[in-house]
Every structure is written in structure tokens, then in C-alpha cells.
Amino acid sequence: MKPRLPHKEDMPMPRFLTALALISLAPMPALADPLQDALAASQDGPLYTFDLTYRDSDIEALIQVDPSRPEGERLLVLSPDKSEWSEDLTKRIEDMQASTDGDIWCHNLAEHIPDDARLVSETDKTATYTFTPLPAEDADKNEKKVTKHLTGSVVVDKTDPAILSFRMASDKPFKPVAVAKIDDFDMQIACARAPDGRTHIARMDMSLSGSAMMQAFSQSDHQAISNLQPIPNSGTGSK
């Protein structure tokens, strides 16, 4: 008599194979993406008053900002005294009075980060991505022409998801328009934790040099935000 080959019904499956089969049928968890985690982090929190230090080649000022006050009354210039204001500082203060709304959050830099940002390095605590930045939603046509020539990078916190730093810079000279050439553009932002845990712009340094209409130009400015104080009963959100 020929030996009978066992039917599959006769063959008990070893326990470890059963376990493997169950695992293979279970949905696999999504891989963690530190950038997406940072961009999805809650942005609830109060408004803050803060001190703003502004400095460029001609101006140095210390300004106290209270975004809960009516538009046009949100800035208090602590120094220099108004009698010492230059024409440039007066114009700068007027522009800031019209635009300051307490929106100091690094999370809003997400508008410049495309979906195809590429992970280039990481540590146990941080991840760094590079990308071609997107223009701001309200960018004018000249800003859009500049943005497409820049390279962006962002560092995010993996352990407590948030943006930690951000940069947009040119890799080589470029001509956004026929009559102007940008030799160098560099904007760097460092972020810090607010008392509620969100990250805010703590320091922003920008430098720009080039030529326009055969005339060379160079400018740089520095802004620093400090001394955040929560505004009672100011609700949640960035504005």
C-alpha cells in the first residue's frame, strides 16, 4: 500500500506560523513622519504681549507689543525716544502698527513647506528637511519670482512635535527681473517655546545684496522676540 499523503486538513499549523499569518493580515501602522507630526500639532493657546528688538543698518529700537489693543495702538516704542526717531524708523513703526496682530508662531511657516519636502538628516530628537519653498499666500509677483530661486530647510522636534528653525536662502546669484540681480539672499529663523508649548519666532535674521539699475545695494535686519506674557481671557489661536 502506498503511503497516504496527508491532506491539508490533517496538518496542524505550528503556533508561530499561525501568529505570522495573523500579523500579515493585520493593518500595518503608518510610519511616523516628524514633519507631518509637527505641522499637525495643536496651535491652541492665548495671545501674548512681547518685546520686539529691531535692528538694521540705520535703526535700532525696542518695542513693546500688545496685540489685544485696537489696531494702531498695539506698539509702544520704549527706545529710542520719539524725539530721536528718524524718517525711516517713523515709517517702519507706521507699517508695523498696521500689520502687527500677535501672529508670531513658527507653525505658520508651514505655508512655505511643500508636500514633497525631503528628509535629509535626523537625530534622536530632531529631523531636518529641505525643499523648494512655496510663496506666501499673499505674496506679490516679485516675491513669487524671488521664492522660486531659493532653497528652504526646516528642523522639527521629534519628541514634542513643533518647528524649531527655518531657513530660506539662495544657492547662487539670480535675476528675478531683467533690471535686477540678487547676489545673495538669506533668511534664518530660530524658534523658542512659549509658556503654552507652542514655538514662536525668537530671532529672525535677513540679509540681501545685489544690484538694480546698475546700482549696488545691500541690506540686513535683525528681529528678536522675548518676554512673552499671556493676555488673560484672550481665548485660543494665533490672532
Image (cartoon, rainbow, N blue to C red):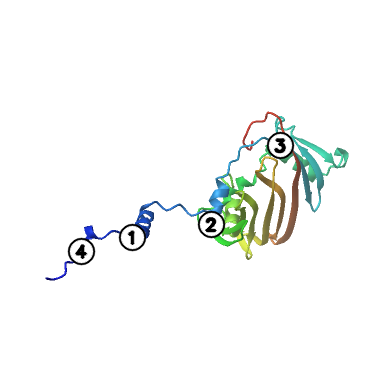
Q: Residues within 10 Å of mark 2 (few under 14, many from 20)?
A: some
Q: Gap in Å between the C-alphas at discs 2 and 4?
A: 56 Å
Which mark is on residue 6? 4
How far is the residue under mark 2 from the one under mark 3?
31 Å
Can residue 153 be seen in the rendering of this structure?
A: no
- Give the number of the disc on residue 117: 2
Amino acid type at circle 3 is Tyr
Q: Which residue is mark 1?
A: 14
Quadrant in the picture for the N terminus: bottom left
Give the residue number, with chain letter if any, for mark 3: 48
Residue 231 on image: x %, y %? 71, 32
Identify whether 42 is placed above or below 207: above
Give the CA distance from mark 1 to mark 2: 45 Å
For marks 2 and 4, the one nearer the N-term is 4
Q: Position of residue 146 (x, y in %)?
A: 60, 56
Disc 3/disc 4 C-alpha distance (Å): 76 Å
Q: Are marks 2 and 4 in contact (CB under 8 Å)?
A: no
Q: Position of residue 212 (x, y in %)?
A: 68, 59
State which tag comes first along the sequence, 1 or 3: 1
Q: Residues within 10 Å of mark 4 (few under 14, many from 20)?
A: few
> Mark 2 belongs to which amino acid?
Ala
* Type of the residue with mark 1: Pro
Q: Residues within 10 Å of mark 3 (few under 14, many from 20)?
A: many
Dot 2 or dot 3: first in sequence order is: 3
Q: Quadrant of the C terminus?
A: top right
Toward the viewer: 188 or 209?
188
Residue at the bottom extreme of this rendering:
2
Q: Amino acid at mark 4?
A: Pro
